[in-house]
Image (cartoon, helix red, strand yellow):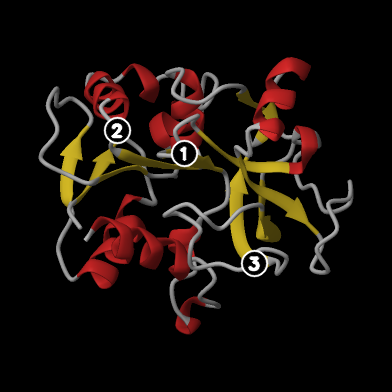
C-alpha cells in the first residue's frame, strides 16, 4: 500500500498518522506539503487532524483552499481512497467531497476524551476488520465536531448506508448522553457515495497499540492495508 499524508501549517497529528501507516505497511508514506499542486502515486491519501491553521475561521475552511486540495479532489474523483480525520473531515465537507458541515460543539467547549463508537457497516476497506454491534473506543479532540446536514441529506446518508460511525455509550446505545458534540443522528463519520472517501472526527491513529492506551484504531489501517496491497 502506498500512502500520502498531506501536511498543513499547524497540523499536530500528521506525525501520528505517518507512524501509524508505516507500522502497518512497512513503508514510509509520502509527505506532501499543502502548497504542492501534484500528488505522488498513492493508493490512499490522508488528511490528518490537528490544529490546522490554528483552528481559526471555521476550522478546515482555510485548509480546504490550499493548493494541494484541488489535486486531492481530483484523485478522489478518480477513485482513490481518501481518509479525513478531524480537521481532515472538516476539509472534506468544505471541498464538497462529503456532504454537510462541522459546526462548533453544542456545549461550545473543546472536547478531548475517549468516546465509544458503533461501526455501522463492516463491508468497506476502512471497517472490514471491525465487528458491527461491538462498540470501539477512540479519542476525540475538537472544538468544531458538531456534524450538521439538512433533513434530506441525512435521510439520503442513512438510506444509502453512508453513516460510518455513530457516537454510542459503552453498551452501544446511541443516546444524547453518548453524543459529545451535538452531531445530528450521533454521526461521528460518513462515507462518500462510492464508499472510497471517509471523514470522521475521532482519531484512530492515536490508538494503535496498548502502550498508547488501546488499539481500537489499528483495525482501520489493517483493513486498508489488506485491501490496497
Local crowd size for mark 1, using a 10 Å CA cut-off: few (<14), some (14–19), many (≥20) = some
Label 1 vs label 3: CA separation?
A: 22 Å
Taking depth in this image into account, of 168 and 68 the one nearest to the observer is 168
Residue at the spot x=41%, y=35% of the render? 52
Q: Is residue 148 left or right of residue 214?
A: right
Quarter of the picture holding the C terminus: bottom left
Residue 134: x %, y % from top left: 70, 69
Circle 1 residue = 195
Q: Kindly identify which residue carries mark 2.
A: 79
Q: State the image coordinates of residue 115 (x, y, percent, origin top left).
A: 70, 60
- Measured as percent of width and height from the top left, residue 173 is found at 85, 58
Query: Considering only order in the chain, which callout, 3 or 2, is on the residue closer to the N terminus?
Result: 2
Q: Residue at x 14, y 33 (%)?
A: 39
Query: Which residue is at the far bottom?
Result: 211
Task: Decide if residue 135 is in sight here.
Answer: yes
Tell me the residue that label 3 is attached to: 137
**Can the viewer see residue 104?**
no
Residue furthest right as drawn = 176
Q: Which sits earlier in the primary sequence, circle 1 or circle 2? A: 2
Question: Percent x, y for residue 222?
Answer: 37, 67
- Label whose residue precedes the other's in the sequence (1 or 3): 3
Amino acid at each position: 500500500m502506498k500512502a500520502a499524508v498531506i501536511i498543513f501549517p499547524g497540523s499536530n497529528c500528521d506525525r501520528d498518522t505517518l507512524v501509524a501507516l508505516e507500522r502497518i505497511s512497512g513503508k514510509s508514506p509520502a509527505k506532501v506539503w499543502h502548497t504542492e499542486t501534484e500528488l505522488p502515486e498513492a493508493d490512499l491519501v490522508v488528511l490528518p487532524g490537528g490544529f490546522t491553521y490554528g483552528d481559526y475561521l471555521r476550522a478546515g475552511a482555510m485548509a480546504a483552499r490550499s493548493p494541494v486540495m484541488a489535486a486531492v479532489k481530483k484523485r478522489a474523483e478518480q477513485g482513490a481512497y481518501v481518509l479525513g480525520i478531524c480537521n481532515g473531515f472538516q476539509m472534506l465537507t468544505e471541498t464538497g467531497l462529503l456532504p454537510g458541515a462541522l459546526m462548533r460543539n453544542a456545549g461550545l467547549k473543546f472536547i478531548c476524551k475517549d468516546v465509544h463508537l458503533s461501526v455501522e457497516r463492516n463491508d468497506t476497506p476502512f471497517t472490514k476488520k471491525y465487528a458491527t454491534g461491538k462498540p470501539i473506543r477512540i479519542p476525540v479532540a475538537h472544538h468544531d465536531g458538531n456534524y450538521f446536514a439538512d433533513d434530506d441529506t441525512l435521510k439520503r446518508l442513512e438510506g444509502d448506508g453512508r453513516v460510518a460511525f455513530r457516537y454510542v455509550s459503552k453498551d452501544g446505545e446511541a443516546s444524547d448522553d453518548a453524543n459529545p458534540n451535538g452531531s445530528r443522528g450521533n454521526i461521528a463519520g460518513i462515507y462518500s457515495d462510492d464508499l472510497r472517501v471517509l471523514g470522521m472526527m475521532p482519531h484512530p491513529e492515536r490508538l494503535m497499540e496498548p502502550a498508547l492506551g488501546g488499539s481500537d484504531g489499528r483495525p482501520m489501517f489493517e483493513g486498508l492495508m489488506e485491501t490496497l496491497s
